[in-house]
Amino acid sequence: MACQRGALIVLEGVDRAGKTTQCKMLVQALQKSGRPAEAMRFPDRTTTIGRLISAYLEKKSELEDHTVHLLFSANRWELVPTMKKKLEQGITLVVDRYAFSGAAFTSAKPGFSLEWCMKPDVGLPKPDLVMFLQLSPAEAALRGQFGVERYETRVFQNAVQQKFELLMKDSSVKWQVIDASKSVEEVHRDITGHSLNAINIAEDIPLGQLWT
Ligand code: Z5A
Protein backbone atom coordinates (compact mmCIF):
# COMPACT_ATOMS: atom_id res chain seq x y z
CA MET A 1 0.00 0.00 0.00
CA ALA A 2 1.31 3.47 -0.87
CA CYS A 3 2.33 5.54 2.15
CA GLN A 4 -0.09 8.31 3.07
CA ARG A 5 1.26 11.77 2.46
CA GLY A 6 2.29 14.18 5.17
CA ALA A 7 0.50 17.47 5.73
CA LEU A 8 1.81 20.92 4.81
CA ILE A 9 1.21 23.12 7.83
CA VAL A 10 2.17 26.81 7.81
CA LEU A 11 2.46 29.27 10.67
CA GLU A 12 2.10 32.95 9.81
CA GLY A 13 1.73 36.02 11.96
CA VAL A 14 3.13 39.38 12.87
CA ASP A 15 6.55 40.02 14.36
CA ARG A 16 7.10 38.27 17.75
CA ALA A 17 3.81 36.37 17.56
CA GLY A 18 5.68 33.20 18.52
CA LYS A 19 5.87 31.43 15.15
CA THR A 20 9.38 30.03 15.61
CA THR A 21 8.69 28.91 19.21
CA GLN A 22 5.49 27.15 18.16
CA CYS A 23 6.95 25.53 15.01
CA LYS A 24 9.65 23.88 17.12
CA MET A 25 7.19 22.73 19.77
CA LEU A 26 4.79 21.32 17.19
CA VAL A 27 7.49 19.34 15.38
CA GLN A 28 8.72 17.90 18.69
CA ALA A 29 5.19 16.97 19.79
CA LEU A 30 4.38 15.30 16.47
CA GLN A 31 7.64 13.34 16.48
CA LYS A 32 7.05 12.27 20.09
CA SER A 33 3.63 10.93 19.13
CA GLY A 34 5.20 8.85 16.36
CA ARG A 35 4.23 11.09 13.43
CA PRO A 36 7.15 11.95 11.12
CA ALA A 37 7.52 15.74 11.05
CA GLU A 38 10.16 18.28 10.07
CA ALA A 39 10.49 22.05 10.40
CA MET A 40 11.18 24.45 7.54
CA ARG A 41 11.34 28.23 7.45
CA PHE A 42 11.17 30.94 4.82
CA PRO A 43 13.27 32.68 3.94
CA ASP A 44 15.63 29.70 3.98
CA ARG A 45 18.81 31.71 4.43
CA THR A 46 21.12 28.74 3.73
CA THR A 47 20.78 28.71 -0.08
CA THR A 48 22.52 31.07 -2.53
CA ILE A 49 19.24 32.97 -3.02
CA GLY A 50 18.61 32.87 0.72
CA ARG A 51 21.97 34.49 1.41
CA LEU A 52 21.07 37.40 -0.90
CA ILE A 53 17.78 37.82 0.99
CA SER A 54 19.50 37.58 4.37
CA ALA A 55 21.99 40.34 3.49
CA TYR A 56 19.06 42.51 2.37
CA LEU A 57 17.10 41.89 5.59
CA GLU A 58 20.20 42.64 7.66
CA LYS A 59 20.57 45.90 5.69
CA LYS A 60 24.01 44.81 4.46
CA SER A 61 22.83 45.21 0.87
CA GLU A 62 20.18 47.07 -1.09
CA LEU A 63 17.87 45.38 -3.60
CA GLU A 64 15.15 46.89 -5.77
CA ASP A 65 11.70 46.06 -4.27
CA HIS A 66 10.35 43.95 -7.18
CA THR A 67 13.65 42.09 -7.33
CA VAL A 68 13.67 41.13 -3.66
CA HIS A 69 10.03 40.06 -3.87
CA LEU A 70 10.87 37.68 -6.71
CA LEU A 71 13.90 36.39 -4.78
CA PHE A 72 11.69 35.53 -1.76
CA SER A 73 9.41 33.62 -4.15
CA ALA A 74 12.33 31.92 -5.91
CA ASN A 75 13.59 30.84 -2.49
CA ARG A 76 10.31 28.97 -1.99
CA TRP A 77 10.28 27.47 -5.50
CA GLU A 78 13.82 26.14 -5.15
CA LEU A 79 12.68 24.13 -2.12
CA VAL A 80 9.54 22.70 -3.81
CA PRO A 81 11.12 19.42 -5.05
CA THR A 82 12.41 18.72 -1.52
CA MET A 83 9.07 19.61 0.04
CA LYS A 84 7.10 17.38 -2.35
CA LYS A 85 9.47 14.48 -1.77
CA LYS A 86 9.16 14.70 2.00
CA LEU A 87 5.36 15.05 1.88
CA GLU A 88 5.15 12.00 -0.40
CA GLN A 89 7.29 10.08 2.11
CA GLY A 90 4.63 10.77 4.74
CA ILE A 91 6.57 13.53 6.52
CA THR A 92 4.49 16.44 7.80
CA LEU A 93 6.19 19.78 7.16
CA VAL A 94 5.74 22.58 9.69
CA VAL A 95 6.69 25.79 7.91
CA ASP A 96 7.58 29.10 9.58
CA ARG A 97 6.28 31.76 7.11
CA TYR A 98 5.37 31.04 3.45
CA ALA A 99 3.90 32.80 0.41
CA PHE A 100 1.44 34.73 2.61
CA SER A 101 4.31 36.63 4.22
CA GLY A 102 5.67 37.22 0.73
CA ALA A 103 2.43 38.84 -0.45
CA ALA A 104 1.70 40.69 2.81
CA PHE A 105 5.16 42.24 3.26
CA THR A 106 5.70 43.45 -0.32
CA SER A 107 2.14 44.70 -0.78
CA ALA A 108 2.59 46.78 2.38
CA LYS A 109 5.18 48.79 0.41
CA PRO A 110 3.92 51.78 -1.63
CA GLY A 111 2.99 51.01 -5.25
CA PHE A 112 2.46 47.25 -4.90
CA SER A 113 -0.93 45.56 -5.35
CA LEU A 114 -1.71 42.39 -3.42
CA GLU A 115 -2.69 40.75 -6.71
CA TRP A 116 0.74 41.39 -8.29
CA CYS A 117 2.49 40.21 -5.15
CA MET A 118 0.62 36.87 -5.10
CA LYS A 119 1.38 36.01 -8.75
CA PRO A 120 4.91 34.54 -8.48
CA ASP A 121 3.73 32.06 -5.82
CA VAL A 122 0.69 30.78 -7.76
CA GLY A 123 1.02 26.98 -8.05
CA LEU A 124 3.24 26.39 -5.03
CA PRO A 125 2.27 23.39 -2.88
CA LYS A 126 -0.91 24.47 -1.13
CA PRO A 127 -0.84 24.26 2.66
CA ASP A 128 -3.40 21.96 4.25
CA LEU A 129 -3.64 24.47 7.08
CA VAL A 130 -2.38 28.01 7.66
CA MET A 131 -2.46 29.16 11.26
CA PHE A 132 -2.28 32.92 11.74
CA LEU A 133 -0.88 33.79 15.15
CA GLN A 134 -2.84 36.90 16.10
CA LEU A 135 -1.17 39.34 18.49
CA SER A 136 -1.97 43.02 19.03
CA PRO A 137 0.85 45.58 18.67
CA ALA A 138 0.55 46.34 22.42
CA GLU A 139 1.01 42.67 23.34
CA ALA A 140 3.88 42.29 20.88
CA ALA A 141 5.59 45.28 22.53
CA LEU A 142 5.56 43.40 25.86
CA ARG A 143 7.76 40.76 24.21
CA GLY A 144 10.60 43.23 23.72
CA GLN A 145 11.79 45.86 21.32
CA PHE A 146 11.66 45.45 17.54
CA GLY A 147 14.81 43.91 16.12
CA VAL A 148 17.26 45.70 13.88
CA GLU A 149 16.31 44.00 10.61
CA ARG A 150 14.48 45.69 7.76
CA TYR A 151 10.66 45.81 8.17
CA GLU A 152 10.88 45.74 11.98
CA THR A 153 8.98 48.97 12.68
CA ARG A 154 5.52 49.49 14.15
CA VAL A 155 4.15 51.42 11.15
CA PHE A 156 5.26 48.80 8.63
CA GLN A 157 4.09 45.87 10.79
CA ASN A 158 0.62 47.47 11.09
CA ALA A 159 0.43 47.76 7.29
CA VAL A 160 1.49 44.11 6.99
CA GLN A 161 -1.23 43.04 9.45
CA GLN A 162 -3.87 44.71 7.24
CA LYS A 163 -2.59 42.82 4.19
CA PHE A 164 -2.74 39.53 6.10
CA GLU A 165 -6.37 40.32 6.96
CA LEU A 166 -7.15 40.68 3.23
CA LEU A 167 -5.37 37.40 2.45
CA MET A 168 -7.39 35.61 5.15
CA LYS A 169 -10.63 36.47 3.31
CA ASP A 170 -9.62 33.99 0.59
CA SER A 171 -11.63 30.85 1.30
CA SER A 172 -9.56 28.74 -1.13
CA VAL A 173 -6.97 28.53 1.69
CA LYS A 174 -7.74 26.86 5.04
CA TRP A 175 -6.96 29.61 7.55
CA GLN A 176 -7.16 29.26 11.31
CA VAL A 177 -6.66 32.30 13.54
CA ILE A 178 -4.85 31.45 16.77
CA ASP A 179 -4.91 33.72 19.82
CA ALA A 180 -1.15 34.15 20.29
CA SER A 181 -1.57 36.25 23.46
CA LYS A 182 -2.15 33.09 25.53
CA SER A 183 0.72 31.30 27.31
CA VAL A 184 3.22 29.34 25.18
CA GLU A 185 1.69 26.06 26.42
CA GLU A 186 -1.91 27.13 25.71
CA VAL A 187 -1.02 28.29 22.19
CA HIS A 188 0.80 24.99 21.67
CA ARG A 189 -2.30 23.03 22.69
CA ASP A 190 -4.49 24.99 20.24
CA ILE A 191 -2.00 24.58 17.41
CA THR A 192 -1.53 20.86 18.04
CA GLY A 193 -5.28 20.22 17.99
CA HIS A 194 -5.76 21.95 14.64
CA SER A 195 -2.65 20.29 13.21
CA LEU A 196 -3.71 16.74 14.12
CA ASN A 197 -7.01 17.38 12.40
CA ALA A 198 -5.25 18.68 9.27
CA ILE A 199 -2.85 15.70 9.24
CA ASN A 200 -5.77 13.24 9.34
CA ILE A 201 -7.59 15.02 6.50
CA ALA A 202 -4.46 15.43 4.34
CA GLU A 203 -3.76 11.66 4.39
CA ASP A 204 -6.68 11.02 2.06
CA ILE A 205 -6.50 13.95 -0.37
CA PRO A 206 -3.90 14.97 -2.97
CA LEU A 207 -1.65 17.97 -2.37
CA GLY A 208 -3.21 21.09 -3.89
CA GLN A 209 -1.77 24.07 -5.76
CA LEU A 210 -1.80 27.46 -4.09
CA TRP A 211 -3.99 30.25 -5.49
CA THR A 212 -5.02 28.32 -8.64
N1 Z5A B 1 9.54 38.16 4.61
C1 Z5A B 1 9.22 38.80 3.42
O1 Z5A B 1 9.31 40.03 3.33
N2 Z5A B 1 8.82 38.07 2.34
C2 Z5A B 1 8.72 36.71 2.40
O2 Z5A B 1 8.36 36.07 1.40
C3 Z5A B 1 9.04 36.07 3.65
C4 Z5A B 1 9.44 36.82 4.73
C5 Z5A B 1 8.93 34.57 3.76
C6 Z5A B 1 12.01 37.21 8.00
O3 Z5A B 1 12.14 37.25 9.34
C7 Z5A B 1 11.55 38.56 7.50
O4 Z5A B 1 11.32 38.43 6.11
C8 Z5A B 1 10.24 38.96 8.12
C9 Z5A B 1 9.22 38.82 6.99
C10 Z5A B 1 10.03 38.95 5.76
N3 Z5A B 1 10.34 40.35 8.50
N4 Z5A B 1 9.80 40.82 9.52
N5 Z5A B 1 9.36 41.32 10.41
P1 Z5A B 1 12.42 35.91 10.15
O5 Z5A B 1 11.50 34.82 9.69
O6 Z5A B 1 13.84 35.61 10.10
O7 Z5A B 1 12.04 36.36 11.60
P2 Z5A B 1 10.62 36.68 12.07
O8 Z5A B 1 9.61 35.81 11.40
O9 Z5A B 1 10.45 38.16 11.91
O10 Z5A B 1 10.63 36.29 13.56
P3 Z5A B 1 9.70 37.02 14.56
O11 Z5A B 1 8.41 37.32 13.85
O12 Z5A B 1 10.41 38.16 15.17
O13 Z5A B 1 9.42 36.09 15.69
P4 Z5A B 1 8.40 34.87 15.87
O14 Z5A B 1 9.01 33.69 15.19
O15 Z5A B 1 7.02 35.17 15.53
O16 Z5A B 1 8.41 34.72 17.43
P5 Z5A B 1 9.41 33.89 18.38
O17 Z5A B 1 10.85 34.08 17.93
O18 Z5A B 1 8.93 32.50 18.54
O19 Z5A B 1 9.13 34.64 19.75
C11 Z5A B 1 9.44 36.01 19.93
C12 Z5A B 1 9.63 36.31 21.44
O20 Z5A B 1 8.38 36.15 22.12
C13 Z5A B 1 10.61 35.36 22.13
O21 Z5A B 1 11.27 36.06 23.15
C14 Z5A B 1 9.68 34.30 22.74
O22 Z5A B 1 10.25 33.67 23.87
C15 Z5A B 1 8.48 35.14 23.13
N6 Z5A B 1 7.21 34.40 23.09
C16 Z5A B 1 6.81 33.49 22.15
N7 Z5A B 1 5.57 33.03 22.44
C17 Z5A B 1 5.17 33.67 23.56
C18 Z5A B 1 3.97 33.62 24.36
N8 Z5A B 1 2.92 32.85 24.04
N9 Z5A B 1 3.90 34.42 25.45
C19 Z5A B 1 4.93 35.22 25.79
N10 Z5A B 1 6.11 35.31 25.10
C20 Z5A B 1 6.21 34.54 23.99
Image (cartoon, rainbow, N blue to C red):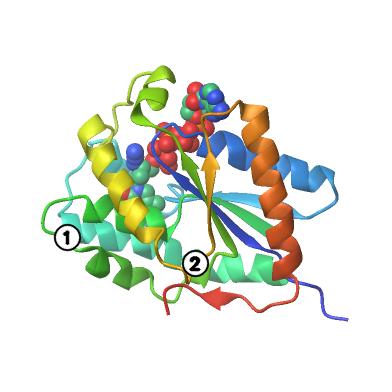
Query: Which element carries disc 1, helix, strand or loop?
Result: loop
Q: Residues within 10 Å of mark 1 (few under 14, many from 20)?
A: some
Q: Whereabouts is ligand 1, in terms of quadrant?
A: top left
Residue 209 on image: x %, y %: 50, 76
User: Which of the two labelled residues, at mark 2 and mark 1, occupies the earlier sequence position?
Assistant: 1
For residue 173, the mark is: 2
Residue sitting at x 56%, y 76%: 208
Query: Which element carries disc 2, helix, strand or loop?
Result: loop
**Quarter of the image holding residue 54?**
top left
Disc 2 and disc 1: Cα gap in Å? 22 Å
Residue sitting at x 73%, y 40%: 28
For residue 137, the mark is: none
Question: In the visual, does 157 lie left or right of 169?
Answer: left
Residue 75 on image: x %, y %: 40, 60
Question: In the visual, does 64 lie left or right of 93?
Answer: left
Residue 94 on image: x %, y %: 61, 52
Residues at discs 2 and 1 in contact (Cβ within 8 Å) = no
Whether the residue carrying mark 1 lies under 8 Å from ligand 1 is answered with no
Instruction: Looking at the picture, tell me which residue is in the foreground, 125 or 86.
Output: 125
